[in-house]
Structures are given as C-alpha cells and as structure tokens.
Amino acid sequence: MDPGLDNGRAAVCFGLGISQQFSRTRGLLVGRRQIRMGTATSPLQRLIQRAASPYTAGPTIASARAVCDRLASLGIASAVCYWNRPNDSPLFTTQCYVALLGLIRGLPPHSYLSVKAPAFNFNLDLLWQVLDQARLTNTTVHFDAMSPETVDRTFTLIEEARRIYPNLGCTLPGRWRRSLGDADRALEWNLRIRLVKGEWPGPNGDETDPNEGILQLVERLAVKGARHLAIATHNRKLGRTCFEYLKNRVASCELELLYGYPWRPLLKIARELAIPTRVYVPYGGTGLPYRLKEAARRPAILTWFLRDLLRGSAGA
C-alpha cells in the first residue's frame, strides 16, 4: 500500500496529459523493512511495535477474518496478506498464505491474496503450493513491492508463475524511475497492477517525485490498455485526479486503502466517482508504514509516530 506521507497541498491537474505540477533473521520490522534496534525486549522496540499495531488486523488469521467481515458488511472487498515475523520460515509463511486463500472463499467476490516474495525466499516450489490453492477459486495472487534489490528476482518469479497460473498482479512504486519499464513488462504479461508511492528509495539515485511518478504511470498504463489498475493512496487530491482521468479510459480501476489509515475521505471520493474500493488487511507481524530513519529529513514522521503510539496505547 501507499506508505508515504500524503501531502494534500500538492498541485495536480490533468490537461491533455498528466500534470507536470507534481514536479527471517533477527531484527525489527519497521515499514516492513528489517532494522536492528536493540534486543527483542528493548524499550524502543516495544514502543515501535505498539505504534505499528493499528496497521495490522491482529496476530492471528481470526483477527484478519473479523476485519474482512466488517468490511464486507460495508460492501468493501479486501486484499489480505500475512506479514511474516523475523523468525518465520519460508514454509510457515507459505502455509499462512494458503490458509488465507481459504478465508477469501467466504469474502466478497474479487477479494485477493497479497504475498511478499522474499518472505518465502523466492522459492517457486513453495509458490506453486499457493497457486494450486488459488486456482480452485481463481483468486488473484498479487506480489507486493519490497526493497529495490528484490525487484528483479520478484519479476523473474512472476514470469515463471504465469506459465502455470495467469491470475497474478504486481505493485509498481511511483518514486522509482525504473517502474516505467516495469510497467511495460506488467502490461505484456497481462498482470493486475497496483500503484503506490513507494517506501524504499531507489538505488543509485533512481528517484523521482512519488506523486509525479504515479501520474506518469497512470497515463502510460491507461494509454497502453492496462487490464486492471489499482491506485493505493490516502492522498485525496492525488486520488481524485487519478480516478477522474482513469474513469473512462481503462476497463477496470479501483481505490486501495491500507488498514489503519483514515479512509472515509477517500471512500467518499471513490463513491462519488463510482470507483470500487478495497482495503489491504494484513495480519501477523507489525510494521510501520513509514521509515523512522527518514525523520531527520521529514520531521512530520515524528508527529505521525507519536500519534500512532497514542493510537496503539489506546488499543492495548
């Protein structure tokens, strides 16, 4: 999902084109990225885990089911994922994905499974177990975007997987310039595509403004006839701009929201434009949707962290 801080003041518009005005080892999972910050019982680590807790349904698959059932009662589909813990084996994570496919059978149509290729060590044999189960209900298996060094291996895995199961999806971060090329590959393979701002910096300066990057991808994918396009953002201005552009230009598009974020303002926009909405619901380990390491450059992250710490304490 969109892990970046939303900037509702950014200028954005469409003209003939898109605006140029958006010019398992040990450790802690922060923003779903592992960093070392003391022992497993360190006070800092406990604080971070508490702040991250509102962004997951809970520790068990029953927690995920309860959230998905509540969303279903509102007519909202889900994307479900197991967020692996540091000591989880690839096999255990795979078994959690298979169990989630059983949960999806009881959810609204078009709910799907998200997976993280590094969590099962890019193992094609383990992925086959997931795909065999997904085939029973023709459920989409979607690959989340992870750190830059995992991208090529993830696409290699998708290329192998699509030979045995075609109902797949991938995630493209707007902040990476390489995503324009990856978009062409996703189109060629007829993948469902989710656009996010992007959590990790691109390698070797492969960076662009995340909002501008998403808009460039939206235009490219619409012009080239994407099969399905999800915009994962909590930025109201960016979301409205994307969907007003996409509404009559692609066969299928949707808004995707991360569980734990404020979602009513975006849901209102989506309903106004008759755009379907889903919520990404993780369970298992906890992870902050922002990187505390960037707080020196982006002081608003500290405010966000303190707010999440209060939310996590209230729910404890």
Image: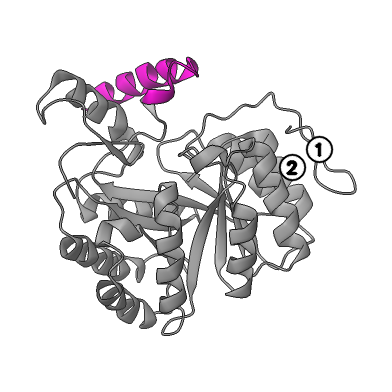
- Tell me which secondary structure the magenta stretch mostly adopts: helix
Q: Residue 139's image quarter? A: bottom left
Q: Is disc 1 placed on a helix, strand or loop?
A: loop
Label count reads 2
Q: How crowded is mark 2: few (under 14 residues within 10 Å), some or many (20 or more)?
A: some
Colour mapping: one colour
Image position, residue 299 (x, y; %): 47, 14
Which residue lies most toward the front here? 204
Tag 1: amino acid? Cys
Q: Which portion, as a residue range, is magenta?
A: 293-316
Magenta stretch: includes residue 310? yes
Q: Is residue 61 left or right of residue 7?
A: left
Q: Do the residues labelled 1 and 2 touch (CB within 8 Å)?
A: yes
Examine the rendered structure and indicate whether residue 201 appears above or below residue 300. Answer: below
The relative height of residue 306 versus residue 235 in the rendered view (above or below) is: above
Tell me the tag on residue 241. 2
Residue in front for this viewpoint, 75 or 122: 122
Residues 152 and 57: in front is: 152
- From what the image shows, is residue 166 above or below residue 13? below
Which of the numbered marks, if any, corresponds to residue 13?
A: 1
Residue 236 versus residue 156 in the image, above or below: above
Q: Is residue 97 on the magenta stretch?
A: no
State the residue in front, 4 or 73: 4
Which quadrant of the view contains residue 48?
A: top left
Judge left or right: residue 218 versus residue 249. Answer: left
Classify mark 2: helix, strand or loop: helix
Residue 244 rendering spot, x and y as whole percentages: 77, 48
Q: Residue at x 63, y 41 (%)?
A: 268
Q: Tell me if mark 1 has few (under 14), some (14-19) or many (20+) residues whose alpha carbon lies within 10 angstroms of its own.
A: some
Q: Can residue 140 be seen in this snapshot? A: no
Give the Cα separation between the discs numbered 1 and 2: 7 Å
> The disc labelled 2 sits on which kind of residue?
Thr
